[in-house]
Amino acid sequence: MRGPSNLLERLTPFFSLILLTTPLWLSFFLPAFTVYLIFIFDLYFVYRSSFLAINSVRSYLKIKESAQTNWLEKARSENLSYQKVHHLVFIPTYKEPYTILERTLSFLAASEFPSKNIIIVLAGEEREEGFLEKAEELKKNFAKFFYQILVTRHILKEGEVAGKSSNQNYAASLVSFFIEQEGFDEDFLTITSCDADVAIHPKYFSNLAYLFLKSPEPYKRFWQGALVFYNNIWRVPLPVRVVHTLFSVAGVADLMRSKTSFIYSTYSASWKMIKEAGFWDPDVISEDWHLFFKTFFATKGQVELEPIFLASSADAVEGNGYLNSLSAQYQQNRRWAWGVVDVGYALKKFREHYREISIPNFIIRLLRALEQHLLWPVNWWFITLGATLPPLINPNLRYTTLGYYLPKLSGIILTISTLFILVIIVIDILLRPPKPEGAKKSFFLVSILQYLLLPITGFVFGSLPGMDAHARLLFGKRLDYKVTEKFEKK
């Protein structure tokens, strides 16, 4: 296992925790500097809010247009041989209910792209009892729709970490033999990592085939669609709904800045690129950003991310009961925050390959990763309590001009950001599935008022799991992969 002993992996959480505590100790020594630092964070929050609002609107309009486009007809009109393309779809699964996998395969079978050109890989775990029986039942019901449904059972080895990355690494090594035996042309083969609960958009693979054939560098590309967590959004507890609403809108908005974004959850690439990079690593927890950096250096810094302007729907975190749902949400966010190790991994690989790659290209990606992970535990403290803490810690600050205007200016700046939140609310309403029958009339009002919980959910499901993950990494405490439990309720 790649443990947290690597010094480079500890740098980001170290500086993150130092930055987080800055108002507590810097207010004594450099109060003016502390005030300016808080103003910078406030302005940064306005920038992030405006980015989220504006780009979510732009991306939403593109998603509507893309969903109405006949991508196969478009490929035909441009003489692109989409019939040559085959799509490998990896579905890593561990203790997923049959009904969840059945739903996922149903959406794949309804693909606009010829499903007989789609190969499904049900990548299970040997430690799951009853997996083979479940897989056989799925094959019996869905084999007629696809070219093939392959079933693999990953046996966890010493040095591996249980989870999606090691599972797909094992599955890919077996699928390689299948591809050779079947004589597939690897030049026209894509691979998609699809989370087991994702209802993928019917036009996704048609759009992917078009972009793959149209790309000037198809073997140095990832493709990422938007993921909205709306499969069960009306059913989950309100705090969980708030978290996944923001995740969903952020995923839509991020399609507009693919040049600095990363893959996540459900994504696609050419089989050749993933194979040449050595597939997924079996000793990591957060596999997506790690895989991006791995292929980045394998292609000498030439890999790029292209957006697919379509929204696929996934399950929001849901436990067996209210408190279990909250606990599961915390654990999931902590697992995602553990992705901070990827910053150290990227720095390590850069140290080995800096002569071979474009340094400006790497710096752009690194800064984006640092923005995400360095500030993950920090933002809430500066934005929510930043204007309050310095005067409390250093009372003399209250009698200075800066100290007097700090809460007033911070209040004005943050009020401006609420205007952008109104746009986010509208985009969320447009993206969500219809309200279920029998829902209370007050349900819509509650879904609007949920944004009042942002200061609370921002701490419990944002800053706190971020601090937890960073502290564990900093002090060498291992984080085990815990699968988010899924439910299919009528």
Image (tube, rainbow, N blue to C red):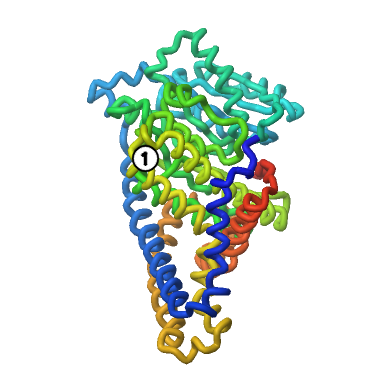
Residue 266: horizontal and vertical position, in percent?
50, 37
Q: Quadrant of the N terminus?
A: top right
- Rendered image quadrant of residue 24: bottom right
Residue 231 visible, this angle: no
Q: Depth check: 298 or 203 in front?
A: 298
Residue 253: horizontal and vertical position, in percent?
39, 51
Q: Is residue 428 left or right of residue 470?
A: left
Q: Please name the residue shown 45% across and 73% down the image.
A: 38
Residue 430: horizontal and vertical position, in percent?
42, 54
Q: Please name the residue shown 40% across and 78% down the image.
A: 412
Q: Please name the residue shown 41% across and 16% down the image.
A: 186
Please, what is the three-letter code of the amino acid marked with disc 1? Pro
Residue 470: horizontal and vertical position, in percent?
60, 54
> Which residue occupies the extreme right position in the image?
129
Q: Depth check: 394 or 291 in front?
A: 394
Q: Depth check: 286 or 458 in front?
A: 286
Label total for image: 1
Q: Please name the residue shown 56% across and 33% down the image.
A: 104
Q: Is residue 163 left or right of residue 341?
A: right
What SS does tag 1 mark?
Answer: strand
Q: Quadrant of the C terminus?
A: top right
Task: Determine crowd level at label 1: few under 14, some 14-19, many 20+ residues with C-alpha closer than 10 A.
Answer: many
Q: Is residue 314 left or right of residue 304?
A: right
Q: Vertical placement of 405 versus 460: above or below?
A: below
Residue 246 visible, this angle: yes
- Rendered image quadrant of residue 42: bottom left
> Which residue occupies the extreme left position in the image?
78
User: Mark 1 highlights which residue?
Assistant: 307
- Rendered image quadrant of residue 417: bottom left
Q: Vertical placement of 211 versus 403: above or below?
A: above
Q: Is residue 331 left or right of residue 199?
A: right
Q: Vertical placement of 407 versus 490: above or below?
A: below
